[in-house]
Image: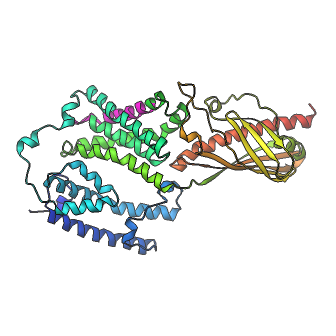
């Protein structure tokens, strides 16, 4: 069989087992030595064969990597991309020559199992070209998907939304992971699959593919709300990250449908959709990455002495009902604070709309510093939902305060600068994205308390 260098990049045609084994061996040798040169000479890190199978425990916190780790990971990924493409292309060719289903190419990405998969492909003999009648026979998907644009779009929703719901339930109720699989892989894969099904009978427009991809994700979100899996607040928070990813998936689907191999490769896309999301969810579950600790500081100036302010810091009266939209939407807000005892070892209770924080006092430095740990956290929010009560898993243990403090600094003219601090963790990934929300929420909670303390202290200082 004549084989050209250009055949390494084209997913059409076939390849015999000897050529497949030879290209695989040479490709692995070249890639390993390239990786070793990059790792040892470029980043002064050891690199051996075992590195390809060592789980990347830091992948869950990829947004928290150091700059050196980020450059290393990015460089290795860029170097791997052409080899990944060649591997997928050659595997598709080999599957076709062996008369095996094209969707088996998904095993190329499954760790450990792919080694056995490669060996089998090197041993299975060729079966010759398929007869013309078999090649012209429409696939199962082609027969069941309607020809019209509206019909194919509707069918894409019927296919992707139930599968998406199943993936969400797998992640939230079985694996209990709210991470890259849920918030990154799922919207991308849903958008990609919807666009692919939408264009099965012929190339659609780019705008049409992106619209169908986003509609599929939107219907998925509404379905989660309808079946009481999630509430409005968390779905709204996920929108800014879901829309770009779904659009990117739709654009990838648009580019795929314009390729000559698209119709024969549709099972590949379908199998990738079915394996991509749960494999990432399972990986996150097995790694159980420890969430990082975040800290939020908020300050306010008060026209009262530290001695006066201290009394309201330790315990404060009930705060009027909130006017802020974020609290009206269901995010937990502080109501009052109570103190039991005095000095280190005393226990402070900060009552919220969803329960109370139990805060044993660690430092009682009157009137300068009050520092406490947190031994009990209430739910961070009450979800908006069509039902009376819905309790997603992320309301328990995924946003946890570990401690806080108030720091009072004496200013000129008898004034006080009051700083509130909270240390917390959240188990949502990508961590940097969800930190934008959690930091903003905690800062708004701080300001609700600090502004109430200012009103109480200034009223006491004025004698009213």
Q: Nearer the viewer, residue 359 or 6?
A: 359
Task: Say left or right for 185 vs 349.
Answer: left
Q: Nearer the viewer, residue 337 or 35?
A: 337
For the C terminus, give its image quadrant.
top right
Task: Write down the quadrant of residue 149 in the picture.
Answer: top left
Q: Is residue 58 above or below residue 351?
A: below
Q: Residue at x 67, y 34 (%)?
A: 354
Task: Write down the quadrant of residue 94 in the picture.
Answer: bottom left
Q: Is residue 97 above or below residue 313?
A: below
The magenta stretch is: 198-221
Find out whether residue 212 is within the magenta segment: yes
Q: Locate residue 420, reporting x and y percent.
A: 74, 46
Find out whether residue 109 is within the magenta segment: no
Q: Locate residue 181, reporting x and y percent.
A: 43, 47
Task: Say left or right for 302 vs 251.
Answer: right
Q: Locate residue 227, reporting x and y percent.
A: 46, 29
């Amino acid at each position: 069989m004549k084989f050209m260098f250009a055949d390494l990049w084209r997913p059409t045609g076939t390849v015999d087992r000897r050529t497949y084994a030879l290209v695989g061996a040479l490709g692995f040798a070249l890639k390993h030595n390239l990786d070793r040169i990059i790792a040892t000479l470029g980043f002064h890190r050891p690199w051996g064969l075992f590195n390809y199978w060592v789980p990347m425990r830091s992948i869950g916190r990829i947004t928290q990597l150091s700059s050196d780790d980020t450059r290393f990971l990015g460089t290795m990924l860029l170097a791997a991309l052409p080899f990944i493409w060649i591997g997928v292309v050659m595997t598709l060719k080999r599957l076709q020559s062996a008369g095996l289903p094209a969707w088996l190419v998904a095993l190329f990405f499954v760790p450990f199992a792919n080694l056995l998969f490669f060996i089998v492909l090197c041993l299975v003999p060729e079966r010759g070209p398929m007869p013309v009648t078999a090649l012209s026979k429409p696939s199962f998907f082609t027969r069941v998907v309607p020809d019209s644009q509206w019909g194919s779009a509707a069918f894409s929703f019927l296919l992707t939304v139930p599968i998406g719901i199943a993936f969400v339930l797998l992640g939230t109720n079985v694996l209990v992971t709210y991470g890259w699989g849920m918030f990154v892989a799922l919207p991308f894969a849903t958008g990609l699959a919807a666009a692919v099904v939408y264009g099965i009978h012929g190339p659609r427009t780019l705008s049409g593919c992106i619209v169908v991809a986003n509609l599929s994700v939107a219907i998925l979100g509404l379905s989660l709300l309808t079946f009481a899996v999630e509430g409005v607040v968390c779905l709204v928070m996920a929108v800014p990250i879901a829309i770009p990813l779904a659009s990117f998936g739709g654009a990838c689907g648009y580019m795929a449908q314009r390729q000559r191999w698209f119709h024969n490769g549709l099972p590949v896309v379908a199998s990738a959709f079915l394996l991509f999301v749960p494999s990432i969810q399972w990986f996150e579950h097995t790694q159980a990455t420890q969430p990082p600790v975040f800290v939020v500081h908020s300050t306010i100036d008060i026209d009262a002495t530290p001695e006066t302010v201290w009394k309201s810091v330790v315990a404060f009266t009930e705060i009027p009902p909130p006017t802020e939209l974020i609290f009206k939407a269901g995010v937990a807000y502080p109501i009052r604070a109570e103190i039991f005892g005095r000095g280190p070892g005393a226990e402070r209770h900060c009552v919220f709309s969803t329960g109370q924080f139990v805060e044993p006092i660690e430092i009682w430095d009157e009137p300068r510093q009050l520092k406490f740990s947190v031994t009990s956290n209430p739910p961070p929010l009450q979800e908006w939902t069509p039902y009376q009560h819905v309790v997603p898993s992320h309301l328990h243990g995924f946003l946890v305060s570990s401690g806080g403090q108030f720091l009072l600094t004496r200013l000129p003219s008898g004034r006080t600068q009051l700083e509130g601090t909270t240390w917390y963790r959240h188990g949502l990934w990508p961590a940097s994205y969800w930190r934008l929300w959690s930091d903003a929420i905690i800062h708004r909670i701080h300001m609700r308390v600090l502004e109430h303390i200012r009103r109480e202290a200034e009223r006491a200082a004025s004698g009213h």
